[in-house]
Image (spheres, rainbow, N blue to C red):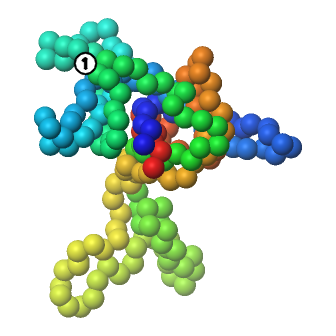
Amino acid sequence: MKVLLGKKIGMTQVFKNNQVIPVTLIQAGPCRVLEVKTKEKDGYQALQLGFEDVKRSLKSQKGKEVRYIREFRKEGTLPKQGGVLDVTVFEEGEEVTVSGITKGKGFQGGVKRHGFAGRDATHGTKHEERTLGSVGSQQPQRVTKGRKMPGRMGADRVTIVGLKVVSVDATKHILALKGAVPGAPGTLLEIRTR
């Protein structure tokens, strides 16, 4: 399993074989290997990666002066602590899985949040075209748990599986993936193979 952290730059398009391919550009790596966890010492095998160096840090973060730290469970051989992983771990045509936090949309109504149809625009409906309508039955005289209602929408962790690597730019550390990935530009992403 190959893993890397990156930041979403934005979307563009690439022309290949007389086709227009929508791609997402990701500033992937370089990531420092901060810690290697082993079964003998920690009870499980994992790799702790750090992304985006910072100039100032707390005394408790000595040796881990990075903005983002993520841990990935990994089997097989692990890289040495202090090593650097960059975008060249991925190859063109390879399928990857990308996880990130989606755009937050704040408090939304039932029509936008759950795709409700809303009410009729005629027959006495006044100022409530986008309301829920009835939210329960006569018994038990309360709103049942799990009822789809207005509330906060977005800002969820989402994983997109099976995105193809279109190109790898090792000099600029840019990875181009076919399709869309979660989040706004600047969102932290976890990129890995299966």
Residue visible at 31% across and 8% down? Answer: 55
When asked about the image quadrant of residue 21, the answer is top right
Which is more toward the observer, 43 or 8? 43
Single out the residue that lies furthest toward the bottom. Answer: 138
When asked about the image quadrant of residue 137, the answer is bottom left
* Relative image position of residue 113 (x, y in whole percent): 43, 62
Quick one: quadrant of the N terminus? top left
Q: Is residue 35 left or right of residue 94?
A: left
Q: Secondary structure at mark 1?
A: loop
- Residue 69 seen from this side: yes
Q: Is residue 147 left or right of residue 178?
A: left
* Relative image position of residue 23 (x, y in whole percent): 65, 40
Q: Of the residues shown, which amino acid type is indicated by label 1? A: Lys
Which is more toward the observer, 177 or 79? 79
Residue occupied by mark 1: 64
* Relative image position of residue 89 (x, y in whole percent): 51, 31
